[in-house]
Image: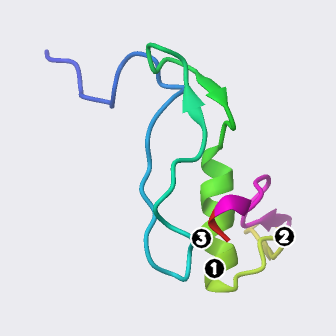
Amino acid sequence: MSKPISGREHWPQCNSILFTGGGLKIGQVIGASDAKAAFPKERPITPEDVISTVYHVLGVDQNIEYMNDAKRPVKILNNGTPIRELL
């Protein structure tokens, strides 16, 4: 049985992402990786920061909570800060 493809399968701590539109400040590189692109060397950004940025641009309050079936509050985003260089 073949192994499913799940991305880089090595050095998953470092990747690239492209943003455009939404009034963002584009045309820049934010952060840097080490020589092997294995780990962030400067300005690490988390997936939560990416989602927080999208919510910010769309005007969504990331502190909103919804009640789950057990009547417990669930935040739409637990962590994350908008990427200031894009705003």
Query: Which type of secondary structure does the marked residue at label 3 adopt?
Result: helix
Examine the rendering and report whether any part of residue 83 can be seen.
Answer: no
At a point 33% along the width and 31% down the height, the residue shown is: 7
Say whether disc 2 or disc 3 marks the residue closer to the N-terminus.
Answer: 3
Which quarter of the image is occupied by the C terminus?
bottom right
Q: Residue 57's x, y, as percent?
A: 63, 79
The color scheme shown is rainbow
User: Of the residues shown, which amino acid type is indicated by label 2?
Assistant: Lys
At a point 69% along the width and 76% down the height, the residue shown is: 56
Q: Classify residue 39 as left or right of residue 80.
A: left
Tell me if mark 2 has few (under 14), some (14-19) or many (20+) residues whose alpha carbon lies within 10 angstroms of its own: few
Q: Residue 42's x, y, as percent?
A: 68, 30
Residue labelled with disc 1: 57
Which quarter of the image is occupied by the N terminus?
top left
Q: Is disc 1 in contact with disc 3, using a CB cutoff of under 8 Å?
A: yes
Q: Nearer the viewer, mark 1 or mark 2?
A: 1
Examine the rendering and report whether any part of residue 63 can be seen.
Answer: yes
In the depicted structure, whether residue 1 falls above or below residue 53: above
Residue labelled with disc 3: 54
Magenta residue span = 72-85
Q: Residue 33's x, y, as percent?
A: 54, 26
Write down the quadrant of residue 68 in the picture: bottom right
Residue labelled with disc 2: 71
At a point 77% along the width and 71% down the height, the residue shown is: 62
